[in-house]
Image: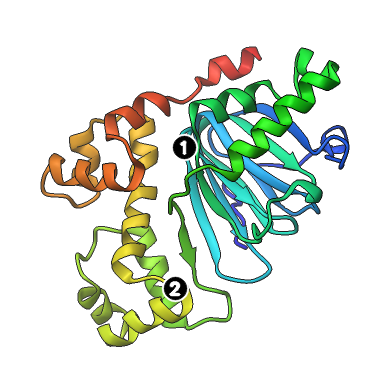
Amino acid sequence: MRRAPHLNTLPLGNVDLFIPTPARPVRCRARPLQHDTHIEPHQHPWAQVACCASGLIQVTVAPAAGAERSCTVPPSRALWIPPGALHAVTVLESATLHTLYIDPSAVPDGWHDCRMLVVSRLMAELMAQVDVGRSAEVPARQGALTTLLLDELRHADTQPLGVPLPRAGGDRRLRALCDAVMRAPTQHPTLADWAEDIGASERTLARLFRTELGTSYQRWRQQVLLAHALPMLARGQPVGHVAAACGYASDSAFTAMFRTAMGQAPSQFAARAKPVRDTDLLLN
């Protein structure tokens, strides 16, 4: 997993107060974090749900099996991280980070891989209430909130919102292509154009995407474009500017792609993802 030396690196810190147990299977840790904060790669024996009430975060996960994945997580989504998976968090826009730690005894059957969950209004309210204030002091209330939250997580809709990355020992041509596209996703419109730069045939690169990343180049590039667009929208940049920066000829084409991927218009996303001001963070 790559580190980010240019960012404000933050250690995980003391989590002893938040360790889940079978008797108290869900613990919540909430904290405001400034833009460009990077929480170092770490892992733990319990599961985790990472989300933000405002702002925007990027979570990179390297599971024991499967491809490393970089996921951009807006307030409308939450990332499920299974027990033992190595992961790191980067704050793309100043955020209020909510982290749920979930005891292995409460992990749903078959949830061995990362998954992006759609955050319903009920889930968001439960995350804000569980394990804090009066809820933590009244066992019956805490138990009821925990049960309902776990049930809401199990039944949440899922949506692809992540960029799978080539493994360290994988094909160097695929790694070179992925690095180049993530640096400049609009430099070339087609895989054939990129193939000329990389020195491999279009057919070979298409096969590598399927075999090593489990997706097509077109779907992979769409996730890259979303990861490119989300921070700009969260900063309040006009939809037309973001659409052009992502290589779209019209606002309507970009909006259609965004609505299909995110379930909401870019303007709706921008309103909800409005980042916490750094001055507000300093006051907390």
Q: Amino acid at mark 1?
A: Pro
Between marks 1 and 2, how big is the CA–CA gap? 24 Å
Q: Name the residue nearer the viewer: 276 or 81.
A: 81
- Residue 94 image label: none
Q: Amino acid at mark 2?
A: Gly
- Residue 74 image label: 1
Percent position (x, y) of residue 113?
61, 60
| Res. 274 image quadrant | top left
Q: Secondary structure at mark 1?
A: loop
Q: Secondary structure at mark 2?
A: loop
**Mark 1 neighbour density, 10 Å: few (under 14) some (14–19) many (20 or more):** many
* Residue for point 21% across, 66% down: 188
The quadrant of the image that shows the C terminus is: top right
* Residue for point 74% across, 25% down: 144
Mark 1 or 2, which is nearer the eye? 2
Residue found farthest to the left: 249
Percent position (x, y) of residue 118?
48, 40
* Residue for point 28% across, 47% down: 260
Is 268 positioned to the left or the right of 55 in the image? left
| Res. 282 image quadrant | top right
Query: Which residue bears the numbered disc 2?
Result: 214
Is 179 positioned to the left or the right of 265 in the image? right
* Residue for point 27% across, 34% down: 265
Percent position (x, y) of residue 228?
36, 48
The quadrant of the image that shows the N terminus is: bottom right
